Image (spheres, coloured by chain):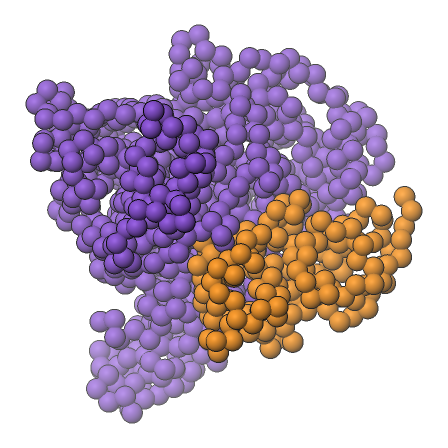
């Protein structure tokens, strides 16, 4: 199979990679870059456990070919905090008990972070709607929604 | 009393929350090792077939393939599994566990062969090259058909009956026939409940290798570390040569209670002497791991005209699927909970479970209880409707109260708060405002259901748990516990209890968990038992060390031990907190004296004998947790679609040790079994139609309702500080509350789940004819 050279910026660092044309971005992130915070949950874009930010927008890494990410800027969950300095929504997830098994958390946190960047003052309905693609089987979503709400500008 | 707590009762962030928030937490698929191979299982194409021959030669010849194994390569392929319990209970409870199919295939997707290869693609290719000659059999897919004489026999294995009956169990209390003869009203209904997938976001997986001392070692997320004993038997090894250095699970819900990848990985690692990883695809997970038991429940209820129930007669047929697994135990829960959480003088329950060629049924959050609760709570509303009573009235008239006995004659020791919580949930919903007839063109309805479910394992299993503590010389504490953490905060709460007792901050207690060679065995993270069992074990253990510390501190403070308390990292006089000595100094003094700064303690649950299954009597579980859900739904009468708008749930949690965790369990359980009403595996003659998350639809953030959680803290539980367990009871009464609310909205009660828009629309149209 022909191999492709791609260059992606992951968590602020330029990475040159050789990938197969059918390699998924998810596998490249998890296996080649060993950033295992991005999760496999369903493989067909239904659960959003594999969410990463591409140019600041949440995308599903299991639905994107690695070659399609060439030249893009990608943030995985490992790149969100600045060392131990968490972004507000990460801290809010911890404080509100919005993390149980934690498997959906990377995707949830990244999606919530993107929402707050797009819309600093989301209503409960807007939060639920924005997170509708992110499955969580543990929390019933209540604590997650509350955590995101607590980061809304009006609640600061 | 509660004012004295520093940590207990607070919404404490868990020790692992930071790693999880940052994506640093490693799960079963997040490890790689040098030279690691990939494992894959070849699975049966048919739900019922005889394997005539298997030819693995082409697969073995494929370059890059290191092992191809079939049943004949497994040292002990068939084993009667103890599922982690300490006691041989016999009586048909222990389930036959088979590693790889031989002879008969019993369900579609049953593993037939295992492959280890250098890449996942090669492993898949090798599976395709294995030739299996099947003789397809008719199979049997309905448990009632399976129990008829002349039915297709699912099993061909020694040690199992020559019929498909797994177990029968009976309760006989009073005289139901006399009560029916004297009844003012009789209500008779049949209910059907479907299989449910756990749909944890993390599928089953892990890594195994043989270490330099010949120990087969795994990193597999499991709810039952004690499976290492079964794995040792399968491998023909002593138990101390098998080790699971387990990892936190990305959800469990009972689906990681049976063995999943463990034996496959160990066999492949042993055969290749290289590390092997196996992770199941979502499709595999949906098709092959065990589901919640589908059941048929037939109810006949007698009552007086003022609503007092005089008799409840229930027949239950359970579909166990292709293997027994935990069916016998699940059946105990369905059988004893069949009459509902009510004080009924005359009860007869007859339960039967059957092998079929469906995917095996086993543990799923609720464990047989939520099936019976669904049926009994619909039956209550049917009775209420017939008598012209309100759902709350009929429940208050009949619910169990302190001192009442359940259907086996056992009187629960723990506090029974059903009356209080039923009122609080219903009044909580009413307080949100009067019920509108319509919202956005949709018909509004409100419903109520209550329930009870045990916490702690069946008492005839003689359950126990152990926790180890070591106080370090700087005053920090290392906690060792073989407590599988599936996300409920099972490990963190132990730290909270220890920190509370020693008067130190929670972050000073570091948990090392889940390693069968190093951690004291805590028993299974199942049966809503970890807080109750391991919480008590932590308390027993820390109290031994606390006594040593206080004794020494008293000496140092020139006081009596009973005058000293541990608080804010100090030992001080209760009456004069200024007279104190730092905790770390007391620890140092004890070390100088040569006093042991470590301890491992054990907690035992109450023990009983195995009940007579033809006439079950007495204590079956330690205690119960009581639930109430009040629900508002909106039904679109044109399409049959419905949404759950609001839920007010109320539980007596005994004591909420970690408020966030406790609330999180109640909310999570609520939405988990909101899904029970609609989730659809689409089983047809042993074939699973829902093979992806595009077909198996679980509730999303938009589907989940606004939830108001009311926690009553009676202190009347058997756990630490009077806590009760909530993990499984959390999903108990929501599903019937939703279906009862739909009835309130549109006047039809669907007695079979899943409630699909098609079924609901048809029922609405038939009613309106």
Residue B320, above or below B532: above
Residue A57, above or below B754: below
- B420 displayed left or right of B101: left
Give x and y (percent) for residue B585. 41, 85
Residue B421 visible in the current orientation = no
The answer to which image quadrant residue B295 occupies is top left
Residue B19, above or below B79: below
- Near-viewer residue (B704 or B268): B704
Please, which residue is most extreme toward the bottom here?
Answer: B578
- Near-viewer residue (B58 or A31): A31
- B746 displayed left or right of B128: left
Letter of the orange chain: A
x 52%, y 71%: residue = A121
Give x and y (percent) for residue B109. 61, 29
Give x and y (percent) for residue B384. 19, 36
- Near-viewer residue (B17 or B393): B393
| Placement of the C terminus of chain B among the 4 image quadrants | top left
Give x and y (percent) for residue B173. 16, 29
x 35%, y 35%: residue = B371
Letter of the purple chain: B
Residue B320 visible in the current orientation = yes
- B563 displayed left or right of B124: left
């Amino acid at each position: 199979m022909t191999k492709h050279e791609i260059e992606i910026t992951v968590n602020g660092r330029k990475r040159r990679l050789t990938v197969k044309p059918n390699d998924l971005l998810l596998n490249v992130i998890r296996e080649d870059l060993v950033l295992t915070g991005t999760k496999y949950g369903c493989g067909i874009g239904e659960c959003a456990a594999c969410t990463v930010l591409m140019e600041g927008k949440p995308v599903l890494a299991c639905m994107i070919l690695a070659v399609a990410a060439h030249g893009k800027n990608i943030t995985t969950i490992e790149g969100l905090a600045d060392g131990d300095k968490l972004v507000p929504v990460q801290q809010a997830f911890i404080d509100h008990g919005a993390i149980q098994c934690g498997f959906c958390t990377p995707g949830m946190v990244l999606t919530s972070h993107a929402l707050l960047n797009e819309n600093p003052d989301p209503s409960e309905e807007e939060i639920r709607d924005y997170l509708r693609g992110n499955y969580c089987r543990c929390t019933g979503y209540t604590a997650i929604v509350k955590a995101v709400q607590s980061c809304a500008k009006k609640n600061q | 009393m509660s004012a004295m707590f520093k940590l207990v009762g607070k919404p404490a962030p868990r020790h692992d929350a930071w790693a999880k928030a940052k994506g640093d937490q490693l799960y079963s698929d997040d490890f790689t090792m040098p030279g690691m191979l990939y494992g894959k299982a070849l699975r049966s194409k048919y739900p019922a077939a005889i394997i005539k021959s298997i030819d693995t030669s082409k697969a073995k010849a494929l370059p890059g393939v290191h092992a191809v194994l079939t049943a004949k390569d497994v040292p002990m392929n068939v084993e009667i599994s103890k599922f982690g319990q300490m006691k041989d209970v016999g009586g048909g409870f222990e389930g036959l566990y088979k590693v790889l199919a031989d002879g008969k295939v019993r369900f579609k997707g049953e593993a037939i062969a295992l492959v280890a290869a250098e890449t996942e693609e090669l492993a898949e290719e090798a599976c395709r090259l294995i030739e299996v000659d099947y003789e397809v059999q008719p199979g049997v897919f309905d448990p009632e058909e399976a129990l008829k004489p002349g039915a297709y026999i699912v099993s061909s294995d020694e040690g199992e009956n020559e019929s498909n009956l797994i177990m029968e169990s009976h309760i006989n209390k009073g005289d139901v026939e006399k009560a029916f003869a004297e009844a003012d009203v009789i209500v008779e209904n049949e209910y059907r409940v479907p299989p449910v997938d756990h749909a944890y976001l993390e599928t089953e997986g892990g890594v195994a290798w043989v270490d330099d001392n010949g120990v087969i070692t795994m990193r597999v997320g499991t709810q039952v570390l004690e499976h290492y004993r079964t794995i040792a038997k399968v491998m023909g090894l002593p138990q101390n040569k098998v080790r699971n250095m387990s990892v936190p699970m990305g959800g469990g819900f009972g689906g990681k209670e049976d063995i999943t990848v463990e034996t496959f990985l160990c066999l492949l690692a042993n055969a290749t002497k290289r590390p092997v990883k196996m992770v199941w695809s979502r499709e595999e997970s949906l098709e092959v791991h065990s589901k919640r038991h589908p059941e048929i429940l037939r109810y006949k209820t007698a009552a007086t005209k003022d609503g007092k129930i005089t008799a409840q007669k229930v027949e239950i047929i359970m579909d166990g699927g292709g293997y027994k697994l935990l069916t016998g135990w699940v059946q105990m829960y369905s059988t004893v909970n069949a009459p509902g959480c009510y004080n009924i003088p005359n009860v007869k329950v007859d339960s039967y479970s059957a092998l079929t060629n469906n995917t095996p049924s086993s543990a799923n959050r609720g464990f047989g209880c939520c099936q019976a609760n669904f049926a009994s709570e619909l039956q209550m509303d049917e009775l209420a409707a017939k008598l012209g009573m309100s759902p709350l009235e009929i429940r208050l008239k009949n619910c169990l109260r302190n001192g009442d006995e359940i259907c086996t004659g056992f009187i629960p020791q723990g506090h029974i708060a059903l009356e209080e919580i039923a009122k609080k949930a219903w009044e909580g919903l009413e307080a949100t405002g009067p019920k509108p007839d319509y919202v956005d063109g949709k018909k509004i309805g409100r419903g109520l259901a209550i329930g009870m479910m045990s916490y702690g394992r069946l008492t005839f299993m003689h359950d126990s748990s152990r926790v180890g503590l070591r106080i370090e010389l700087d005053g920090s504490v290392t906690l060792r516990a073989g407590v599988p953490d599936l996300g409920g905060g099972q490990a963190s709460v132990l730290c909270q209890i220890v920190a509370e007792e020693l008067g130190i901050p929670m972050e000073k207690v570091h948990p090392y968990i889940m390693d069968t060679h190093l951690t004291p065995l805590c028993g299974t993270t199942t049966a809503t038992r970890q807080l109750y069992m391991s919480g008590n074990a932590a308390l027993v253990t820390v109290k031994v060390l606390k006594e040593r510390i206080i004794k020494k501190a008293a000496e140092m403070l020139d006081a009596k031990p009973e005058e000293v308390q541990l608080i804010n990292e100090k030992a001080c006089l209760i009456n004069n907190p200024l007279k104190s000595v730092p905790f770390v100094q007391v620890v140092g003094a004890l070390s100088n004296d040569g006093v042991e700064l470590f301890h491992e303690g054990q907690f035992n649950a109450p023990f009983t004998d195995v009940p007579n299954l033809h006439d079950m009597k007495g204590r079956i579980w330690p205690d119960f947790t009581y639930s109430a859900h009040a629900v508002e739904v909106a039904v679109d009468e044109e399409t049959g679609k419905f949404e759950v708008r609001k839920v007010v749930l109320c539980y007596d949690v005994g004591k909420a040790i970690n408020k966030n965790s406790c609330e999180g369990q109640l909310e999570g359980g609520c939405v988990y079994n909101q899904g029970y009403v609609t989730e659809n595996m689409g089983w047809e003659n042993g074939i699973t139609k829902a093979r992806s998350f595009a077909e198996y639809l679980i509730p999303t953030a938009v589907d989940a309702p606004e939830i108001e959680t009311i926690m009553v803290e009676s202190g009347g539980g058997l756990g630490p500080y009077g806590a009760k367990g909530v993990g499984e009871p959390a999903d108990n009464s929501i599903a019937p509350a939703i279906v009862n609310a739909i009835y309130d909205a549109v006047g039809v009660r669907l007695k079979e789940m899943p409630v699909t828009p098609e079924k609901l629309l048809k029922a609405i149209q038939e009613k309106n004819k």
